[in-house]
Amino acid sequence: MEVLTTAEMERADRFTIAAGTPGFALMLSAGQAVAEAAMDLVEQGPILVVAGSGNNGGDGFVAAAELAARGREVSVILLCERDSLQGDAASAARGWKYPVLPFNPHAIGKPGLIIDALFGAGLNRPVSGEPHDMIEAINGNGAPVLSVDLPSGINGDTGAVMGIAIRATETVTFFRRKPAHLLLPGRIYCGRVRVADIGIDTRVFEEVHPQTFENIPQTWQKSFPVPRVDGHKYARGHAIVVSGDIAATGAARLAARGALRAGAGLVTLASPRDALVVNAAALTAVMVRPIDTVVEFGELLGDKRLNTCVIGPGAGVGGRTRDFVQTALATGRCLVLDADALTSFSDAPERLFEAIRSAHDSQVVLTPHEGEFPRLFSDISNKHPHRSKLERVRAAAERSGAVVLLKGPDTVVASPDGRATIAANAPPWLATAGAGDVLAGMIAGVLAQGVAVYEAACIGVWMHGEAAREAGPGLIAEDLPEVLPAVFRRLYDAFDIEY
């Protein structure tokens, strides 16, 4: 579940070598893993390895020698002169007893498989010249492509395309995934990703201390809330969702339904009086309370059992929403701020951040999408436009003092303490109106049960994606809460929880 930056992976390699495993032994294991993947990918036909001048190319040479030893027809194109290779890559090249082809796109021919061993994860500059032409030719060749570590042309830390990049059928990476295997657009270029064990012991984490993780159940299993046999609804928390006026009530109802399905024991919709009849007529298990003013809202929160609030979905932009947020923070509630709540502070984001930092008893998660993020974090977006999504969200969490969740097909959740997850389970049909409102409610439903805010946000994001997968193409937001029981059942089975 750990995700390693390129620098962290280099440290893991160095630590392993210092502990007694030769670097060339790691390269042999990596090359053999590539050969295994190639054999699985194509059963027959010639194989072409396109090798670079570094260790990625060395992995390619090992794979070529292994495949040839297994009787496959293999050829190698090398970016540089063979004699100029150094270190482990030179040792790997010496194991290839055959000539190498010139680095020329015309030398590609019509292979059954191309193994891309040009650059790997360490590329940090735009691809140009002959490598650019070679990548262009590989993409246009039509043969399936197996990339070593990462498709050449993708930045391993950001997932960015450095001018041009290989579009791989499959990618073999080593020990752990890198951010670009999960972040867009890199994830799209990787195809299927296979993680190979090459002999690096997990004790390296004592040295590396990774802070980034894939958002999968193993990441937050210990925090997952399970109702007790002797429990009751009040023990599972009570979430409040703030509704907007009569013309904008649907978003809050979606959030409320999401909170209830995600496990909150009780959910109440705080509704303006002009929308009370509309909300009450549309809700059954969710309770409705007439709340017009911030004074009434504060009185409602006088009941300490109401431990979590969602403010934003359809709440309206302006002073009323700002006042509701600050009241919730002042009373120490767990708080999910979405949509209109974020936009209401766009002209004075520091006012929100100061209130969050001052509310020591509150746990807060901000859930912007890419359009809303710059409204609160314009300096992060404008001064550092080339930062990765992961870096931007981490910086936003540190600045705001809240957990920040930046939505998208590669949703990132970051905590002010530096921890972050990247989700890769959201299907394309999750991009539909109201889906974010349900997510805000789901996170609140987990928070209400006493889960810490960072873990609650991660759980909510993963379950949101899984619910969309369960519903399938044609999904609308109303479907998401209704398929959550099936997601819970799968989780209970995976965690060996009786139900």
Image (cartoon, rainbow, N blue to C red):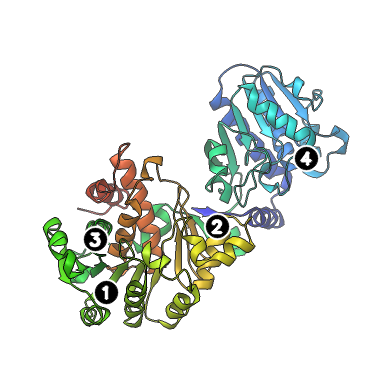
Of 177 and 103, nearer the camera is 103
The numbered mark, 2 or 4, whose residue comes first in the sequence reads 4
Tell me the number on the disc at residue 390: 2
| Residue at mark 1 | 307
Residue position for label 3: 256
Ranked by sequence position, the earlier of labels 4 and 3 is 4
- Secondary structure beneath disc 2? helix
In depth, the one of 61 and 238 nearer the eye is 238
Is residue 442 at all visible to an observer of this figure?
yes
Q: Is label 1 in contact with label 3 (beta carbons under 8 Å)?
A: no
What residue is shown with label 4? 89
Q: In the figure, 303 relative to 239: above or below?
A: below
Which residue corresponds to the image point at 29% horizontal and 44% vertical from the top-left?
Answer: 476
* Local secondary structure at mark 3: helix
Give the amino acid type for the residue marked by disc 2 in the picture.
Answer: Leu
Whichever of callouts 1 and 3 sits on the residue coming sooner in the sequence is 3
